[in-house]
Amino acid sequence: MPGSIGMAQDPGRVFPGKRMTGHLGDVTKTTQNLDIVRIDEARQLLMIRGAVPGSKGGFVTVRAAIKAKPSTAAKGAN
């Protein structure tokens, strides 16, 4: 039970954007600089070194890293 979520008779509704419970961590998270240590083709497994976000049994998408090149304006500012 979340407790009180609104007012009494007037306005008699819950305002849009009211912070409530639910969908904690239900976001797509990107983590860079992880290393693929070993590939086991027989069991179709990837061994990854690093902190992989998400709960156990979740889905992980592995793809090549596309990193932004440093801009020339940032080099000239130093």
Image (spheres, grey):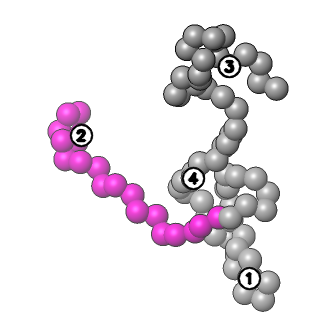
Where is residue 13? Give x, y as percent.
Answer: 59, 22
> Mark 4 or mark 2: which is in front?
4
Magenta stretch in the rendered image: 60-78
Q: Secondary structure at mark 4?
A: loop
Taking the spot 79% from the left edge, 84% from the top edge, the residue there is 43
Q: Secondary structure at mark 3?
A: loop
Q: Nearer the viewer, residue 70 or 66?
A: 66
Q: Secondary structure at mark 1?
A: loop
Q: Amino acid at mark 4?
A: Thr
Q: Which residue is mark 2?
A: 74
Task: Give me the C-alpha separation between circle 3 and circle 2.
Answer: 48 Å
Q: Earlier in the sequence, mark 1 or mark 2?
A: 1
Taking the spot 79% from the left edge, 57% from the top edge, the residue there is 56
Task: Give me the C-alpha separation between circle 3 and circle 4.
Answer: 28 Å
Q: Nearer the viewer, residue 59 or 65?
A: 59
Q: Which residue is mark 1?
A: 44
Q: Which mark is residue 28?
A: 4
Task: Give me the C-alpha separation between circle 3 and circle 1.
Answer: 48 Å
Q: Which residue is mark 3?
A: 5
Q: Amino acid at mark 3?
A: Ile
